[in-house]
Image (cartoon, rainbow, N blue to C red):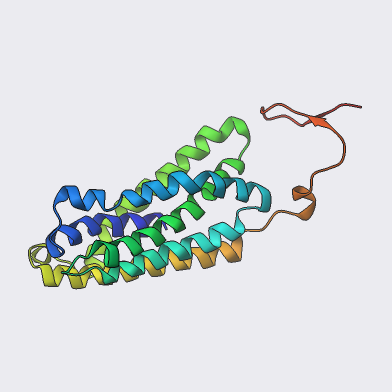
Amino acid sequence: MYGALAGALFLLPIQLQQVAGYTALQAGISLLPLTAIMLVLSARSGALAARIGPRLQMSVGPILVGAGLALFTGIGPTGGYATEVLPAVTVLGLGLATTVAPLTATVLAAVPARHAGMASAVNNDVARAAGLIAVAVLPSAAGITGAAYLDPRQFSAGFHTASLISAALCVLGGVLAAATIRGPHPAAVRPRPGRRLHCPLDAPPASRS
C-alpha cells in the first residue's frame, strides 16, 4: 500500500497540471481534504483499533484506498474539481484514516516498549523504500515514457493505467491483511474485574487488594 500510494500521488499533480490545466498551487490545494480527513478521523480510528483489534481496519482501509485510487481514472482534461478530483480524494482520505493509525499502532505494539523507536524506524524505512521503488517503476509499468510527460493525451492514458495498478496493489494489501492478521482473543478485549493500577511503562500492571 505504501508503494502504490506514493507512486499514484507522485503522478497525480502532473496529471492535474499537464492534463487538467491546474496551476501548481491549485494542484497542491486540491489534496488538502486528505489532511483534513486524517486530522479528524485518525485518532478515532486508532481508538477503535485499540478496542477491537486492527484486523478489520487494516483489511477494509487498503480497499478504500484502492477505491480512491481507482477513481483517479475519472480525472481528465475537464478537471472538474467537485466531480472528478474531490470524490477520489475523499474516498482516498477515508481509506488512509481507516488504515494508518491501526497500522502504526500494530507496528509499535509488536515489540517491547524499549524497542518502539526501532519499530517506528523500520516502518518509516519500509514506507520510504516502497515509495522510491514505486516512483521508479510505476511510470514505466504504466507506459509513461519521457516523451509522454509532454503529451497530455498520452500521459493521461498512462496515469489512468498507473492508478489502476496502484488500486489493485492496495486491494491486494487489504486481502493479505484479512488473511494474515489475527484479531485479538476475546479475553484480551474484555476488561478484567477488579481495580487495577498501572503506569505507562513496559511493566506488568499492579493489583491493589
Side (left or right) of 62 relative to 208: left
Q: Closest to the observer: 3 or 205?
A: 205
Q: Closest to the observer: 7 or 79?
A: 79
From the image, which quarter does the C terminus lie in? Answer: top right
Q: Is residue 143 visible?
A: no
- Number of numbered tags placed on the structure image: 0
Q: Is residue 74 above or below residue 48?
A: below
Q: Residue at x 57, y 33 (%)?
A: 115
The percent position of residue 79, horizontal first and vertical second, equals 20, 65
Q: Is residue 208 above or below residue 94?
A: above
Side (left or right) of 202 relative to 44: right
Q: Residue at x 51, y 33 (%)?
A: 117
From the image, which quarter does the N terminus lie in? Answer: bottom left
The percent position of residue 94, horizontal first and vertical second, equals 45, 57
Q: Residue at x 56, y 57 (%)?
A: 57
The percent position of residue 207, horizontal first and vertical second, equals 85, 29
Q: Is residue 27 visible?
A: yes
Q: Closest to the observer: 77 or 203?
A: 77
* The residue positioned farthest toward the front in the image shown: 82
The percent position of residue 92, horizontal first and vertical second, equals 39, 59
Q: Residue at x 39, y 47 (%)?
A: 36
